[in-house]
């Protein structure tokens, strides 16, 4: 399956709606900025996106990411150092992921308690 390029999708959408491509591009980039800011400023492990649904952060993926990031940041290998520089990895990113994992754990714990509290009645 070959992904559609945003440029092609914007032009096709503009043609279908009889709108200027610049207007459609601005709307798409505006929506993308909102979504990226919601992800960066994570207050909850779920993010609701209008017309797309709800995204949920996976605890297992977060744990895997934290372990891999720890390994890269604490490694003395030249290749690992190149990855840290290339992907701009830092301790602040690690702290952000750890905080996200704590949010996830709290959220899923409260969901578990709500679900089983109703079953006990």
Image: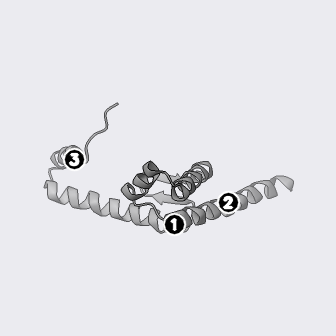
The residue where tag 3 is placed is 13
Looking at the rendered image, the disc whose residue lies closer to the viewer, 3 or 1, is 1
- At 56% across and 67% down in the image, what residue appears? 95
Quarter containing the C terminus: bottom right
First reached walking from the N terminus: tag 3 or tag 1: 3
**Could you say where residue 113 lies in the image, as x and y percent from the top left?**
77, 59
Residue 51 visible, this orientation: no
The residue where tag 2 is placed is 105
Q: Residues within 10 Å of mark 3 (few under 14, many from 20)?
A: some
Query: On screen, 5 above or below 45?
Result: above
Label annotation for residue 91:
1
Colour pattern of the rendering:
one colour
**Could you say where residue 73 lies in the image, as x and y percent from the top left?**
52, 59
Q: How many marks?
A: 3
Is label 1 in a helix, a strand or a loop? helix
Mark 3 and 1 residues: CB-CB less than 8 Å, in contact?
Answer: no
- At 21% across and 56% down in the image, what residue appears? 24
Looking at the rendered image, the disc whose residue lies closer to the viewer, 1 or 2, is 1
- Viewer-side residue, 25 vs 101: 101
Q: Residues within 10 Å of mark 1 (few under 14, many from 20)?
A: few
Q: Within the image, what quadrant is residue 12 found in?
A: top left
Is label 2 in a helix, a strand or a loop? helix
- Whole-angstrom CA distance, mark 2 to mark 3, is 40 Å
**Could you say where residue 7 lies in the image, as x and y percent from the top left?**
20, 47
Quarter containing the N terminus: top left
As drawn, is 39 to the left or to the right of 19?
right
Residue 47 visible, this orientation: yes
Is label 3 in a helix, a strand or a loop? helix
């Amino acid at each position: 399956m070959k992904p559609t390029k945003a440029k092609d999708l914007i032009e096709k959408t503009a043609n279908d709606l009889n709108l200027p491509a610049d207007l459609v591009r601005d709307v798409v980039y505006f929506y993308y900025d909102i979504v990226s800011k919601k992800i960066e400023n994570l207050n909850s492990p779920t993010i609701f996106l209008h017309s797309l649904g709800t995204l949920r952060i996976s605890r297992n993926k977060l744990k895997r990411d934290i372990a891999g990031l720890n390994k890269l940041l604490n490694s003395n290998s030249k290749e690992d150092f190149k990855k840290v520089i290339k992907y701009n990895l830092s301790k602040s990113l690690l702290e952000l992921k750890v905080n996200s994992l704590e949010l996830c754990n709290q959220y899923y714990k409260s969901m578990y308690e709500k679900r089983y509290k109703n079953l006990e009645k």
